[in-house]
Image (tube, rainbow, N blue to C red):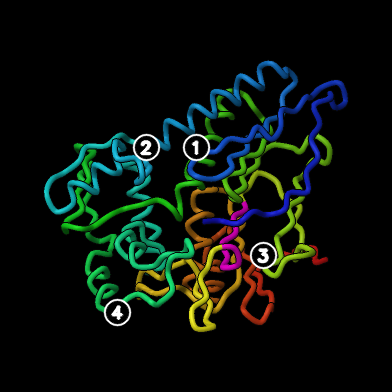
């Protein structure tokens, strides 16, 4: 789960300089989160048509990638684990291929095969003791993106071991937000914003202020940590402050390290600024898992990507190419 960034944004339904109108905050429950689509266009009627088309597009993609929908192609892959190949459409095939690449990039800190471990840890209030270590060890045997086999010629996927599962909880919202941005741009929406449960992607000019002013939430609540004036990018935050469990006075984050099977620790939040929402989504989780030192080292090695990291002592670390406006 990704956590909502404050968006210092005012778009009105009235015309702006007699040229632009905005359709804002069309909110839908999609992917289990609030999904907001805002677009800027001179023709308000056309803008609403585009928003409605975008919502239908979200529902279509969700029906393909959702591991909760038993009729989805992702569920078909999981059911066929260790048994048979599953033919999928190009969008899902490409997403899986890119996910494998991100797993390699992050040395396993991001891994879409983490599903079996997620069955061990419950963050819905029902878990009162630490999961049995043997259960965790058994689940770990089913994790590893190297065991996702891809037939590029026939566009088929096979999970090589029975019991393996893939899921897109740490990349799916970013993937869909990026897809919807591209979809709207093809409809000649030259400015807008997609908010998917806290994953933000925006393009073009803000109708009132040119750039988009984004504030990064304080993990402790209250005044945001800092703000950023940005254009044509995505901002995604992962943190431990809204979904966690405390057992024997120890706080356990819902973000699980796929390399150990245990919750990641050491950080309160990671904010990634990246031109691509899908990659930002995945990296926010990966950096949280990697920790402060290795996480910032990874981001500094990637061109055009920045990070703001808050550790358990509330110290703030930023990547080399960003200068936030602190409050």
Which residue was labeled with disc 1? 179
Q: Residues within 10 Å of mark 4 (few under 14, many from 20)?
A: few
Give the alpha-carbon distance from disc 2 to disc 4, as whole Å. Answer: 37 Å
From the viewer's perspective, is the residue at label 3 or at label 2 nearer? 2
Q: Quadrant of the C terminus?
A: bottom right
Q: Secondary structure at mark 2?
A: helix
Residue 182 or residue 50, whichever sits in front? 50
Report the side of 97 relative to 193 (left or right). left
Q: Is residue 52 magenta?
A: no
Task: Report, in whole angstroms, how far the alpha carbon at label 3 lies from the one at label 1.
Answer: 27 Å
Segment tinted magenta in the rendering? 235-242
Q: Which residue in the protein does label 3 denote? A: 321
Please, what secondary structure does the residue beneath circle 3 have? loop
Residue wearing tag 4? 133
Earlier-in-chain disc, 4 versus 3: 4
Q: Report if the CB atoms under discs 2 and 1 are less than 8 Å apart.
A: yes
């Amino acid at each position: 789960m990704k956590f909502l960034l404050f968006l210092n944004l005012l778009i009105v339904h009235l015309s702006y300089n007699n040229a632009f109108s905005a359709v804002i905050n069309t909110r839908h429950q999609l992917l289990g989160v609030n999904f907001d689509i805002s677009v800027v266009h001179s023709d308000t009627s056309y803008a609403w048509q585009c928003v409605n088309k975008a919502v239908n597009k979200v529902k279509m993609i969700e029906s393909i990638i959702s591991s909760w929908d038993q009729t989805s192609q992702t569920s078909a892959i999981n059911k066929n684990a260790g048994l048979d190949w599953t033919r999928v459409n190009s969008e899902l095939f490409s997403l899986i291929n890119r996910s494998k690449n991100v797993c390699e990039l992050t040395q396993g800190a991001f891994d879409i095969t983490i599903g079996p471990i997620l069955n061990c840890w419950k963050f819905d209030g029902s878990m009162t003791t630490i999961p049995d270590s043997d259960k965790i060890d058994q689940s770990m045997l089913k994790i590893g993106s190297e065991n996702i086999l891809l037939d590029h010629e026939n566009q088929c996927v096979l999970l090589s071991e029975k019991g393996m599962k893939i899921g897109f909880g740490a990349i799916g919202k970013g993937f869909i937000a990026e897809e919807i941005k591209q979809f709207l741009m093809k409809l000649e929406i030259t400015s807008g914003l997609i908010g998917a449960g806290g994953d933000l992607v925006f393009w073009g000019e803000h109708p009132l202020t040119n750039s988009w002013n984004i504030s990064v939430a304080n993990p402790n609540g209250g005044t945001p940590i800092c703000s950023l004036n940005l254009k044509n990018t995505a901002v995604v935050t992962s943190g431990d402050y809204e979904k966690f469990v405390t057992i024997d006075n120890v706080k356990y984050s819902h973000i699980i390290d796929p390399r150990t099977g245990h919750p990641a620790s050491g950080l309160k939040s990671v904010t990634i600024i990246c031109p691509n929402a899908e990659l930002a989504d995945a990296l926010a989780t990966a950096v949280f898992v990697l920790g402060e030192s290795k996480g910032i080292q990874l981001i500094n090695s990637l061109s055009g990507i920045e990070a703001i990291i808050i550790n358990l002592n509330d110290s703030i670390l930023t990547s080399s190419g960003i200068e936030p406006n602190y409050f």
